[in-house]
Amino acid sequence: MEHERIRISDIAEELGLSTAAVSYVIHGKTGKVSEETIKRVQELLEKRGYIPSMAGILLAQNNSRIIGIVVNDHEKYEGRVLEDGFISSAINELSKQIDEAGYFMMIKTTTQWNEIARFASMWNMDGLVLMGFCEQDYRKLRDSIRIPFVVYDGYFQETRGICNLTLDNHDGGYQVGVYLKRMGHEKVLCISDNFICMDSERMDGCTEAMGTRSVSFLQIPVQKEARMWFYRERIEEILEYTAVFAVSDYYAVELMHFLQERGIKIPEDISIVGFDDSPICTYSVPKLTTIRQDVSLRAKHAIAMLQELKNGTAEHSTVRLPVFLVERQSVKKRNEEE
């Protein structure tokens, strides 16, 4: 039979103490009570099996030592956002850095910016790392909470009070263009589910390196089922190009598998390049050539920026991290006669 929950007032009454004294012990404010009182309260708490409200404890403290990671559960992930290669590797590195800094990590997925404010306030969080929301959401959040946050994966103009941790997306695309041009490719197709923000920077970089006459663009559907139908309808058009630059590893590997299932060889018939160097790149056959970001460095910057924001010492609102090309087996060097 389940016992009734023990209350602070019950402990106080049994020991002949005030509820404030018992609360001080529970919440770690032991400087306000004697050692003898601390011992008596702790012994009775253990004996009675008292289970404190964690939320209450955290709200009573000046800081919770909790950093929240909030990820936009965008429709393109189809309810599996935490399984995405980029997201999972980012969270893995953030977990390491948060632990090393002496904090705890809590994760939430949502599509609503106002849920972030409730989530952070409920647990009295020391900071937030946000992924995948839009500029308007970040601005609203900045006006609604005082908890410091870092935008880990977003795109917007430099904004006071918002720390943006981004990549040199244009340079990443430029490196792809230089590489494909060096490998003899003169007709490259860029694919993305949008032509704005980070994806636009990546494609613009590729175009700048190769020249506008050498690069074309194809906007693919966000939903996977629609995307597969789209590829079936446009396969002949895709095969008119010698190489495809997908703005994410997921889209690159997905297209690779789609083509291989139809007897098209990678890279013999068409070369493919991705972006991010997520774990999926080394599991594909052939292994995917891609643009790598240093996820460990990015995570370190995120936690350092949060600490600077909390201490009031943050100097830069935008940090742009470098990226570099990783050559693997998914790109073929074309001969001049081809």
Image: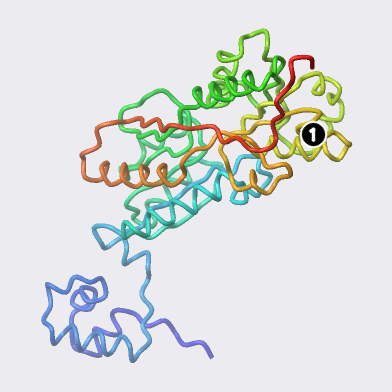
Q: Which residue is mark 1?
A: 226
Secondary structure found at label 1: helix
Q: Residue furthest top?
A: 213
In the image, is residue 200 above or below residue 166?
Answer: above
Q: Position of residue 36 (x, y in %)?
A: 13, 87
Tell me: 291 left or right of 33. Answer: right
Q: Residue at x 65, y 49 (%)?
A: 80
In the image, is residue 38 above or below residue 79?
Answer: below
Q: Position of residue 67 (x, y in %)?
A: 38, 53
Q: Residue at x 25, y 42 (%)?
A: 308
In the image, is residue 157 above or below residue 146?
Answer: above
Q: Position of residue 332 (x, y in %)?
A: 72, 29
Tell me: 186 left or right of 19. Answer: right
- Kind of residue indicated by mark 1: Ala
Q: Position of residue 214 (x, y in %)?
A: 68, 12
**Residue situated in front as seen by the camera: 146 or 73:** 73
